Image: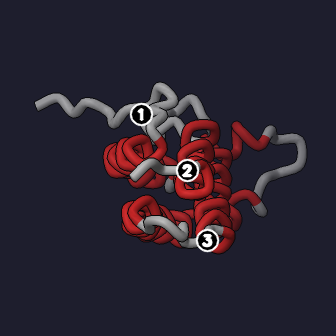
Amino acid sequence: MRQTAPDIAPAWKIQVELATRVDTVRLGSTTRPVGETLACLRTVVGETRAALREAELPAASAAPMVRLLPAAIELCALVEPVLDRWEPLLAAHERTRPAGTPPADHETAWGHASACRADLAALSEPLGRIVGRLSEITGADLGLHPPVVAG
């Protein structure tokens, strides 16, 4: 059965959020501020939940939703523990920033930055797989593919 736009709309919304907010290949990069990455991931989780709340089960076939739900649940289950761990610690560190110190410099001095980046980098592969699953639902790859792991 042919999928219609309403059938795939929630998957499309989530896929676009991942594509435009999160570079799954470079999540642990030292070139992007940790706070910015955490904020983007928090937005993706919020938009994922909103897309699911707004979704209506298609009358003709629930197949896209049946495929979307596990991907959306996995996305939230992967990202939320990382956010719950690191957002409060980074916020506490940010509150200690001396006047006149640029936020990026202060964040670089954060003692947990490397561990946080490692946790963010660990999300790259599973989020890349989720992007692939969303691509299968929507029929659009948006140029994002799961990262290749050497080995």
Q: Identify residue for label 1.
A: 25
Secondary structure beneath disc 3? loop
Residue 52 visible:
yes
Residue 89 visible:
no
Front-lying residue, 28 or 8: 8
Q: Quadrant of residue 63?
A: bottom left
Q: Residue at x 33, y 51 (%)?
A: 126
Residue lying farthest to the top in this orientation: 143
Residue lying farthest to the left in this orientation: 151
Q: Amino acid at mark 1?
A: Val
Tag on residue 56?
3
Q: Identify residue for label 2.
A: 4
Q: Earlier in the sequence, mark 3 or mark 1?
A: 1
- The nearer-to-camera label among 2 and 1 is 2
Is 45 left or right of 145, judged from the image as shown?
right
Q: Position of residue 33 (x, y in %)?
A: 63, 40
Residues packed near mark 3 inside 10 Å, few (<14), some (14 to 19) or many (20 plus): some
Front-lying residue, 1 or 78: 1
Q: Is residue 2 above or below residue 96?
A: above
Tag on residue 138?
none
Q: Residue at x 17, y 29 (%)?
A: 150
Which corner quadrant holds the C terminus?
top left
Secondary structure beneath disc 1? loop
How far, Cα to Cα, is label 3 from label 1?
Answer: 32 Å
Q: Position of residue 141 (x, y in %)?
A: 45, 32
Residues packed near mark 2 inside 10 Å, few (<14), some (14 to 19) or many (20 plus): few
How far, Cα to Cα, is label 2 from label 1?
Answer: 30 Å
